[in-house]
Amino acid sequence: MTTEVPQQSSIDVRQWPPPPPGWPVTAPTRRRPGRHSLGATRQPDPSVTGILRARGVRKVYRSGPHDVEVLKGIDLDVDAGELVMVMGPSGNGKTTMLNCLSGLDEIDAGTVYVDGDEIHTMPDAMRTAQRARRMGFIFQSFNLIPVFTAEENVELPLLVTGVKGAEARSRSRAMLERVGLASRAMHRPNELSGGEQQRVAVARALVAEPAIIWADEPTGNLDSHTAAGVIDLLEQVHTSGQTLVVITHDRAIGARGQRLVQILDGRVTYDGTPAGHLDTLDAPGSATRERGL
Amino acid sequence: MRRAPPPVSEACEVVLWVVMAAALVLPASDFVRHASFRRLALRNIGRRKVEALLIVGGSLMGTAIITASFVVGDTFNSSIRDGARTQLGPIDERVVVADPLGLPATEVSLRDPKLPDVDGLLTVTWTDVAVASIHADRRAEPNLRMAEYDFPAARRFGGDVASTGFGDAGPTPVGLDAVLNADLADKIGVAAGDRVDAFAYGSRLRLRVRQVVPELGVAGSAGIFAAPGTIERMAASATATRVGRPHAEVLVSNRGGVFAAASATAAVDRQLAERLQADSGVRIENTKRDLLADARARGDSIGQLFTGIGMFSVLAGVLLLVNLFVMLAEERKGELGMLRAVGLRRNHLMRAFGLEGACYGLVAAVLGAVAGVGVGAAIIVVTRGIFTGEASGNVTLRFAASRSSVVTGACIGLLISLATVYGTSARIARLNVIAAIRDHPDPARSRRERLVWILGLTGTAVGCLLLLVGLARSVPLLTIVGPPLTCFALMSLTGGRAAPQSAVPLLATAALIWPMLAFSVAPEAMRGASIPVFVVQGVILVAAAVTLLSRAGGTWSRASDAVGRAGDAFALSAGLPMRLGLAYPLARRFRTSLLLGMYALVMFTLTFLAVFAGIFAAQEHDFLRDVRAGTDIVVDSNPANPVDAATLRRQPDVADAAVLLRAGPEFTTRIHPTPTRWALTGFDATFLRRGVPSLASHLARFADARATWEGVLHDPSLVVVSDGFLRRGRAPVGVRVHLGDTINARNPATGSTRTFVVAGLIDRDFVFNGVLASRSAVDALMGPGGALPTRAYVAVRSGADPVAVAARLQGRLLANGVEARPFTEVVHEQTSQQIGFFRLMQGYLGLGLLIGIAGLGVVMVRAVRERRRQIGMLRAMGFTSAVVRRAFLFEAGFIAAQGIAVGVVLGSVTAYQVLANSSTFGEQPLPFALPVLALITICAVPLAASLGAALIPAAKASRIRPAAALRVAD
């Protein structure tokens, strides 16, 4: 893990984000022996620091008789407040890494700690609760719920974590205002432009104040001008202390991060500052380049 | 499968073939000539085989229902027609000779010279007898025919020995020998060599069974065949003054086979009439033609009834098909937009999409027709269980399905599918390319708006016109259809510049209220509303209610918002899934309306039938009170030896007996000028001694029912008739007799006539008394020999069991051929059959419900696919699989519950309207009552089945792995 990136905020990762009202903050209460109850927190591993810690993560896709090993032992640490850009050619495992490290997908080997909790040993319900409390997602295709208005889309992560309706609505409105879409709050996704939809997606990812936001090609469907607006927005979010992991193909966007992680053939082949490395991304031999550790 | 005559004429079948061929030209030509269309259609079908199967499964129900209706008609038609083979054979006409002594002369006059279209004549003498076995467990048949034939002549009759049934019957019986047909032998349990007792004219004759012949042709025309002269000897011993005399007839066989010969009846009837014009003592009866016409009428009638009720299910099938195609189009919106972008014209897009639907439709039509035969067979099995005894008309239902019916069912099913598919495809093909590709809403189109204006204004004008005509001419159908048509036409103008969207709920409410108010607002115009009017009323009500509900999304949204955002444990476990579950159906109004309509239509009819079944069940006691006239048993006896009142009164536990005269003259009325044989019953003061049958209505000059009966007793020009007068067989349906109407009666034996005025109407004629007049009036028309005292109403002593007394009467008065039936049994049997018929119809409609449930299942399966990405996102955001599963179940439950509620409420309202405003079920209004238990079942079973149908898709949705769903998307 790079030590060059200074902490952007003085927030104690153990205390942040603040738990939603009514959320248990004490040691976990097991409802049944040997089974994790939904919403309960587990005692974090005190030896694990940072928002995210992944070690030796392997992922194999099985398609008929063929096994394709997409991740071949990913090690990655992300500290609170970091803005990590993940780059690499298509088909080399960037999105799979995001899915595995965020708990959206299972892994075949390795460990992933989020906020000190090993998420892949949890049952699905608890991992889902972890995502609700600690993660936000932004995708290339926006993935807004078409039958809900912008405001309703944004308040969903709050409702699922038990925030009461009035508060959820007010926080949703505030978040839409923050992303510049207060006037479009009552519009449905198909009444919004691509840029607006993505800003709603950003608002939705932010609204529950997650520990980490995962963004997979957030500007992939947008023109350069709109894309720049979205990236500006993400930078603002980062500036306020939010941890972000952004997958992108765009070097200009990659250059705006403090830290660049390059994925090649299912491995982290570079982890360091973007400066000076972006130009060599596609150069011969870059795949064998040592990680900047 | 037995061969059956086609219920749809061959000309109609040809027209259907031509129409179907024309309808298939476009898809067939596209399939052959356009490889790209073919590839698109076939590969899209092959891509999702299970869904393709579900679509075909949903679509084939409509064809199955139509085909089943035809097959049921075939079976009734064929079974009744079978009587022509089993009871008539070569007998086409009967020349009835009033005086048996004149029989030889009549036969000679017909035989020489030979009539051109006749190939055989046969004389017969017959009478009504009771026959009983003589072994220990004595079994009797109280009323059947004994006939005397010359067996060799009978074998020659008609030129086809096999069709006479006498092929192996041997010589004509002599002495005390008799030949029995198989049906009678089976009923009384005798075989060749056994002895039987025959009772008639007060005497008993012990006969030896020489042989048993099959019930076929001439051998099926009577139960027992005796030696010539037997009947005359028995009649000679008669001591009673009023007994039926032996009947003498010349049977006529037309040229041609058993069924084809009936087509010559008109010509033969003319030839017979010419030959017999000098003979006033004879009359000609076209027995076979009448039987076949009756078979056709009853087959068509029952087939139409099933088709009419089944149309609700067919309509549900059409809605399902539209829904499926709209979903398909939605799913492939981007793909369709791209096809347009790369150069496919709208017309091409419609044809490419339509070709896929045509493939589904074709397969569904073929499979549906086959399934329809199976459904028809199942209906017949159930019907056999319901219709037994007297009310079945002694017809044994034998399953039959004609090629014509199966083909016609398939053709209609396919045409409905093609019309639905191409109509929906045309709508889909109007998509805006950019909007489709970018998943944006379609922009408004000015050309379409013009068309909407034209159609909307035309519809409005037509609706107003229909109302005016309906009011002016008192046509209930037009009166009830007009205003809703105007409302729906005006609705089509909303949303554009013409009218605001907010007008829709108002217009839908108006369309909903008018059919309910019409009976009060325009009573004159709505008078005489028949069942079809109420069916149309139901469809209008359902359409209006569904439209109204589709606009009530805001209310549901607010309710689900309130629960979904409560923020407590309940909100997380139920409120949030509810909010998600409601969001989709509320947002997709068109699709939801189609599903709602599908459910509501079927539930509407189910409820309607359930209410009537419940009311009939509850009314059994009242029906009994209405019909029994203070007595307990109805007794029918052998015309050749009728039992008299004194004999009946002497029987143990009999308190009183009133004997009625029975006759069968021909009747005509102003609106029914065709002479039709109908029962005429004559009563005297004894009939009114213990009470009177209830009347639904009577002339105003009589104070009450008793006064009316007394009036009829003392005035020979007055009669009481049942509401169903002249409404059987070939009588036109809907032709009703009213108070004060004049009816004409004619004695066919003597030609004497008499005119009666209807003084009272009976709602339910359970024992088929027909027209009731005083004995003197009946005697005046029929003469002493024309009306016989063969019916009696018997009252039992207090504390005696009518069932036991009836059984005892049958045993003790066997010589009189007594059939004694307690009124409780008569009423219960017929009420049960009526209720059974409603239940059968409900079962039949269950098919429509299957369409609805299967449709909902298919829609939910497709919804899972359509929303895969969104489900992935919800799961990524932290929605648990349980929340996703519950959301799908809420969605299915919400749609089903709304549809069920709409159907049940409107079905109940319409049933109430029918009871309050229609005389379809009798002049006397039946008290309305909701069958709560039946309605709970009707609601619970479909709701549970709908949730069951949604369980698999819901589980599938909950198992979607977020990474996989999002990977597909990105």
Image (tube, helix red, strand yellow):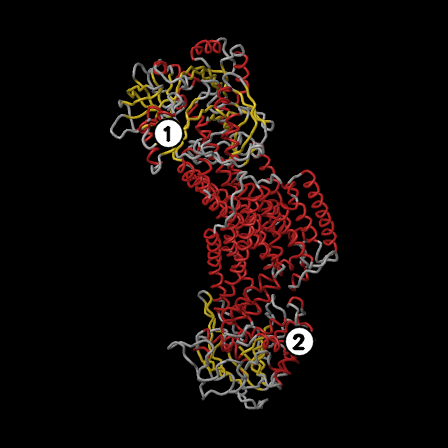
Name the residue nearer the viewer: A79 or A169: A169
Is residue B236 toward the left or the right of residue B784 in the image?
A: left
Residue B194 marker: none
Which quarter of the figure is the C terminus of chain B placed in?
A: bottom right
Name the residue nearer the viewer: B541 or A291: B541
User: Residue A105: image x %, image y %?
Assistant: 49, 73
Q: Is residue A254 above or below residue A146?
A: below
Q: Is residue A264 above or below residue B239?
A: below
Q: Chain of mark 2?
A: A
Find disc 1 in the rendering and name its residue: B819
Asked whether residue B363 is in view, the answer is no
Asked whether residue B571 is in view, the answer is yes
Which quarter of the figure is the N terminus of chain B placed in?
A: top left
Q: Residue at x 65, y 64 (%)?
A: B438
Residue at disc 2, secondary structure: helix
User: Residue B324: image x %, image y %?
Assistant: 56, 54
Is residue A141 toward the left or the right of residue B69 in the image?
A: right
The Cα–Cα distance between marks 1 and 2, rounded to whole angstroms, is 96 Å
Name the residue nearer the viewer: B242 or A256: B242
Is residue B299 toward the left or the right of residue B435 in the image?
A: left
Single out the mark in the foreground, 1 or 2: 1
Q: Is residue B812 above or below residue B966?
A: above
Going by the numbered disc 1, the residue's amino acid type is Glu
User: Residue B520: image x %, image y %?
Assistant: 63, 46
Q: Are marks 1 and 2 on the same chain?
A: no
The image quadrant that residue B201 belongs to is top left
Find disc 2 in the rendering and name its residue: A227
Going by the numbered disc 2, the residue's amino acid type is Ala
Residue at disc 1, secondary structure: strand
Q: Please rate how many residues cluster around mark 1, counting C-alpha atoms within 10 Å: few if below 14, some from 14 to 19, many from 20.
A: many
User: Residue B513: image x %, image y %?
Assistant: 63, 51
